[in-house]
Image (spheres, rainbow, N blue to C red):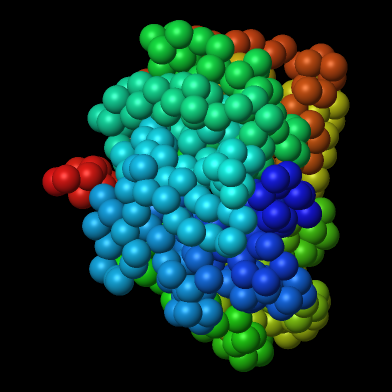
Amino acid sequence: MNSAAGSGVEVAAIDTPALGDRSYLAHDGEIAMVVDPQRDIDRVLDLAAERGVRITHVLETHLHNDYLTGGLALARETGAAYHVSAADQVAFDRVPVSDGDNLEFTASARIQVLATPGHTFTHLAYVLAGAAGDPVAVFTGGSLLFGATGRTDLLGAAHAAELARAQHASAARLAAALPDQVAVLPTHGFGSFCAATPAASANSSTIGEEKARNPALTLGVDRFVAELLAGLDAYPAYYARMGPGNDTGPGAPHLSLPHQAGPAELRRRMAAGEWLVDLRSRRVFAAGHLAGSLGFELGNTLAPQLGWLLPAGTPVTLLGETAGQVATAQRELARIGVDRPAAIATGQPEDWAAGEPLASFPVRDFAALATARRERPLTVLDVRRNLEWAAGHVDGAVHLPLHELAGRLGEIPGGELWVHCQAGYRAAVAASLLQAAHRQVIAIDDDFGHASQAGLPVVMEPVVTEPTARDRVGVGAEAAHLDPEARRPGQ
């Protein structure tokens, strides 16, 4: 909890580490406003109840592309006014707000609306000011982040450069309009793919600090645009569905657990092409799992990675050691529109297999790879993204980003296959996909920095500065995401 000095308002951050995002509850002890709420609004309602405050305003800085909002559901639940940019074309009633508007929040605080296009065409920032009109904090959404800015290609690659220039101008506007001591409160930048470049690791910042370190405020516009565009790499395919979903106003998710499936039902679901997702740790999964199931270890990368790879509309059954493990995964997936698993199964894989043999694959490190490579023919498969590969990769490795793997299995050489990523999570997912496709696979669970230490030759390649739409969002129908012109104001 941080006090916005001079406003009589305290601001509480509501973190969503799995998506790298942050929402805010700001209150004066009686009434509250919420900025950029996630879809699971029970967290917001619980915090408001804990503080003993009534939510009267819900504000969106933009229509998000990385998660489904809880804004409309929260406003309906609490009777709060729902503030969304007047330029956004939405299918629900809202209180439209535009640049220069002033919102009365409390007796001692008000909100000024500033247009800050860049991350989207219609992006807004909300300045929290005290009774005397002095700004004390600014909710910057996906615009000005900690040491970074929001990416500008989510509405289509054709608009990335135009929006990058707008992003630079918006950052300059905030820096010129607000005193150095004003707190910067972004939504993205805590690991979110919405950040154009990795954000600073700090947990707080001010306008003055951003003036000193943020590329949007330290570089000229041409260099800023060039560097931002050069740093854009792939982002999850499910982003294509979030914008349209937020246009229509999603409801709150249903988080009660589905029914428990027995071994026969699990086999039927797998035979029908559904995904059985095992949430146990990746090493435990590798040691023994239901044949054909896919390993997505429960943690902060589950939702973005599973959401990225799961074909739209494919039913999911969650397998976990406990009901609590499954419930956590269900909540995280609901934030990105993967609603209501078809079924769940808890316990151990022996319970799910009903006597059938379990599948497994070896787990090794880069030192073991170096030894094996000297002894026999094998293929090294690197499943990292394009910019990671360009920054350094094992000489002779095959590169196939994880999000393209399912559609390009035929391109992978036969025989013994060692798969790696940057730290092990994606390699484990890839190994489960490859094993389900009947490939001989070994997963490397190790930090890529150890590759050269193990004696493996690591080489670099020039960075691709203009990734294609296919590079950014994956293969197939997901690459053709929303019509970017539908999200441009006035059209």
Lateral position of residue 147 relative to residue 307, left or right? right
Lateral position of residue 6 relative to residue 389, left or right? right
Q: Please give the name of the residue rendered at 46% of the width and 14% of the height, measured from the top-left corner.
A: 224
Total tally of numbered discs in the picture: 0
Q: Is residue 196 above or below residue 432?
A: above
Q: Which of the pair 400/66 is nearer the observer?
A: 66
Q: Is residue 32 visible?
A: yes
Q: Position of residue 82 (x, y in %)?
A: 42, 66
Q: Quadrant of the N terminus?
A: bottom right
Q: Position of residue 23 (x, y in %)?
A: 61, 55
Q: Position of residue 152 (x, y in %)?
A: 40, 32
Lateral position of residue 258 relative to residue 81, left or right? right
Lateral position of residue 159 relative to residue 238, left or right? left
Q: Position of residue 229 (x, y in %)?
A: 42, 21
Q: Please give the name of the residue rendered at 75% of the width and 39% of the height, measured from the top-left corner.
A: 203
Instruction: Report which quarter residue 279 is drawn in.
Output: bottom right
Instruction: Report which quarter residue 395 is drawn in.
Output: top right
Q: Is residue 460 above or below residue 365?
A: above
Q: Is residue 142 visible?
A: no
